[in-house]
Image (cartoon, helix red, strand yellow):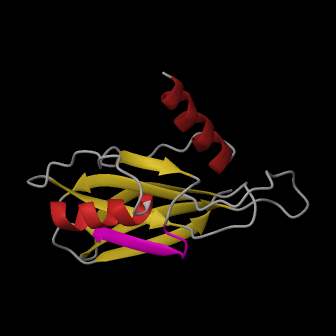
Amino acid sequence: MRSQFGVVALSVALAGGVIAADDAVRTLARGSQSGVKKPDRVVAKNQEEWTALWKRHLGEAQTTEAPKVDWSKEMVLAAFMGTRNTGGYALQITGAKEQEGKLTVQVEAKVPKPGGFVTQSITSPFHMVAVPKSTLPVAWVVGEAK
């Protein structure tokens, strides 16, 4: 119940209203602390790639198992914002749709307003989702949440 509230609260914070994530997008992990310190977008299409990505995300010392993915039907999309000097940043993959011969992935990035109140801690926002498997090339479209 608590995690559902967090998802709704983040959605409201990102858009100033509710963002309806695409029905085909299933969140595997999202937060503000990742071991991926540089901005990146990654596609994992099998267990080996997913295990390597999960290990990269958590770091060498972590032992938490990666969320399950049905590789016969799904693949993983991951967006990483990279290291930020304060809180107030967030990422959300809001949709993935096949169009014009590509799988277009919508990512919304929240950036704190200048002079706004934020936590004074280093963050590395990320969002990882499972989506229906596709052989199309992936085109990432990143926009700022309003």
Q: Quadrant of residue 140?
A: bottom left
Q: Nearer the viewer, residue 37 or 20?
A: 37
- Do we see residue 13 in this rendering? yes
- Spot occupied by residue 61 in the image (x, y as percentages of width and height): 42, 58
Magenta span contains residue 41: yes
Residue placed at 74% from the left, 56% from the top? Answer: 121
- Do we see residue 46 in this rendering? no
Q: For the view shown, which residue lies furthest in the top direction?
A: 1
Decide: is 9 above or below 115. above
Q: For the view shown, which residue lies furthest in the right direction?
A: 115
Decide: is 41 above or below 67. below
Q: For the view shown, which residue lies furthest in the left direction?
A: 72
Magenta span contains residue 86: no
- Spot occupied by residue 58 in the image (x, y as percentages of width and height): 43, 58
Q: Nearer the viewer, residue 38 or 129?
A: 38
- Give left or right: position of 59 versus 134: right
Tell me how many marks there are: 0
Q: Which residues are magenta?
A: 36-43
- Spot occupied by residue 128 in the image (x, y as percentages of width and height): 39, 55
- Give left or right: position of 112 versus 84: right
- Give left or right: position of 65 versus 113: left
Residue placed at 53% from the left, 25% from the top? Answer: 2
- Spot occupied by residue 102 in the image (x, y as percentages of width and height): 27, 75
Quarter of the image containing the C terminus?
bottom right
Q: Quadrant of residue 54?
A: bottom left
